[in-house]
Amino acid sequence: MSDFRITGIVPVLPAPFLPDEELDLDSLRRMVGFAADQGFSAACLPAYATEFYKLSIDERYALVGTAVEAAEGRIPIVGQSNHYSAKLAAAIAKRNAELGASAISVAVPRLFAISEEDIFRFLATIAEATPLPLMVQDFNPGGATVSAALVKRLNKAYPHFRYLKLEEPLMAPKVAEVLAETGGAVQVLEGWGGMYLLEGISAGVCGAMPGLGVADLLQEVYDLAAGGDLNAAMDRFERVLPQIVFSLQNLELFLYMEKLLLVRRSLLSHATVRAATLTPDPDTLKHVGLLTARVLSAVNK
């Protein structure tokens, strides 16, 4: 069994683009170096916050391969292997493993409604593609996420399935249920940008997967809360929460704000988001500027 273990924050790295929308791998190397310096449990890509849905398969592999190379063994890279086809998701997972990823993550396909038995078969196909630790991401707006019974069944069949990433409000009961059903064999991460991190810690989450721009601040929040200083954690959390809440009104807005923040933090050369994307209006831009400044002041405090 791999010694891969998550405790705290695992940032999702954005796809860095030049102004012509070609990949900017130098910026990716800089971001991976920053993540390694911060001592995060791992870094993940190419996920939704990496615009994976706008990337070719070759570009996805280029990002994972470059990230692994840049990490130099200092930080594990989680290779996100999303596809609506189980066969193709498994092929992507296998290739990400060959590129040196330390773990594999895959999102439950939610384009159309399918049964839990269908979901189990989908995830089993990916689990059989590689023995690397497997993380399952489930985001199902307006509907139930995977049941604790399915999580237990999948872990029993494939013990390397060890992490579940949930992105829903009021998730504490689900976290407790998953931990109880699996005896802690499957740990839960909070994934909605870190918005539910504090109540998640109380429920037993092992960490969160936000964007890189606020990841170091949220690691401080996690460490303070896990250490029992909830008031200090709350004070720190309040500095970054407005940025998270405002950005997650729309994923494309999140991408815009995340990349702008990373440019301001000298981790990204260009704030380019691939089209089609959301073009913020002047009032939104003004508020984004205010929120970005507040995050930067928290970083420098």
Image: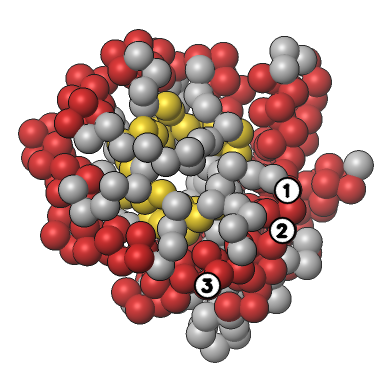
In depth, the one of 180 and 212 nearer the eye is: 180
Looking at the image, residue 210 sits to the left or right of residue 143; the answer is: right
Amino acid type at circle 2 is Phe
Question: Disc 1 designates what residue?
Answer: 38
Query: Which quadrant of the rendered structure holds the N terminus?
Result: top left
* Disc 2 element: helix
Residue visible at 91% across and 42% down in the picture: 301
In depth, the one of 185 and 89 nearer the eye is: 185
Residue visible at 60% across and 62% down in the picture: 71
The percent coordinates of residue 151 (x first, y second) are: 25, 27
Distance in Å between CA atoms under marks 3 and 1: 19 Å
Above or below residue 298? Residue 202 is above
Give residue 128's mark. Answer: none
Distance in Å between CA atoms under marks 3 and 2: 14 Å
Q: Is residue 139 visible to the viewer in this orientation of the structure?
A: no
Labelled pair 2, 1 in contact (Cβ < 8 Å): yes
Above or below residue 197? Residue 217 is below
The percent coordinates of residue 153 (x first, y second) are: 18, 25
Amino acid type at circle 1 is Gln
In depth, the one of 153 and 299 nearer the eye is: 153
Q: Is residue 249 visible to the viewer in this orientation of the structure?
A: yes
Question: Disc 2 designates what residue?
Answer: 34
Mark 2 neighbour class, 10 Å CA radius: few under 14, some 14 to 19, many 20 or more: some
Question: Disc 3 designates what residue?
Answer: 66
